[in-house]
Amino acid sequence: MLRIEVDKQVIKPKHINNIYYFRVQDLNNVEVFFEPWCIQPLVRFGYHLVNYGMAGINQWNHKLDFVADLNWAEKYFEQIVYYKKQYIGQTDQLNSDAYLGIDSFHWDIVEQIENKL
């Protein structure tokens, strides 16, 4: 059983090959109710598999709820970087590029690739 509510209105999702698709507008409140309880459905935003915590999805025994956001990809990336920094311990001397792969564009690598082309 699957019931999807968008802003407290039940919508009918498209069902193809045991996968359910539905569209929402920006900042809609979405609740996905399911049975059997205590399962963990795979969630994709725009065909990208997402982690519940990083995507801001609240997981309950019987439902998932979240606020739809058109800028989900940017916020998702920000969450990944934030938690990586927390994991390795953020300090002023941290070389973010060495650990996280951000804050630097590798011109030397680009130059090597261009030379080989």
Image (spheres, rainbow, N blue to C red):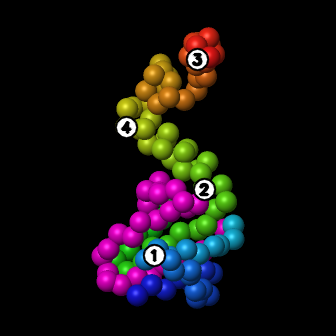
Q: Secondary structure at mark 2?
A: helix
Write the residue at 43% across / 77% down: 18
Question: Could you tell me how far apart the alpha carbons at marks 2 and 1 are, in whole angstroms?
Answer: 26 Å
First in sequence, mark 3 or 2: give its number.
Answer: 2
Q: Which of the two discs, 2 and 1, sits closer to the camera?
A: 1
Q: Are marks 4 and 1 in contact (CB under 8 Å)?
A: no
First in sequence, mark 2 or 1: give its number.
Answer: 1
Question: Could you tell me how far apart the alpha carbons at marks 3 and 1 are, in whole angstroms?
Answer: 42 Å
Q: Is residue 21 left or right of residue 59?
A: right
First in sequence, mark 3 or 1: give its number.
Answer: 1
How far across and how far down the image is residue 59, in percent? 40, 69
Does 61 sit above or below residue 44? below
Does 56 sit above or below residue 2? above
Write the residue at 44% across / 60% down: 52
Question: Could you tell me how far apart the alpha carbons at marks 4 and 1 are, in whole angstroms?
Answer: 39 Å
**How many labels, in total?**
4
Residue nearest the observer in this picture, 46 or 32: 46
Question: Could you tell me how far apart the alpha carbons at marks 2 and 4 are, in whole angstroms?
Answer: 22 Å
Residue indicated by mark 1: 17
Q: Amino acid at mark 4?
A: Tyr
Residue indicated by mark 2: 72
| On-image quarter of the C terminus | top right
Question: Could you tell me how far apart the alpha carbons at marks 3 and 2 are, in whole angstroms?
Answer: 32 Å
Q: Amino acid at mark 2?
A: Trp
Residue 113: give its label: 3
Q: Which of the two discs, 4 and 3, sits closer to the camera?
A: 3
How far across and how far down the image is residue 95, in percent? 48, 21
Residue 39 highlighted magenta (yes or no): yes
Q: Amino acid at mark 3?
A: Ile
Magenta residues span: 27-54
Does 107 sit above or below residue 87? above
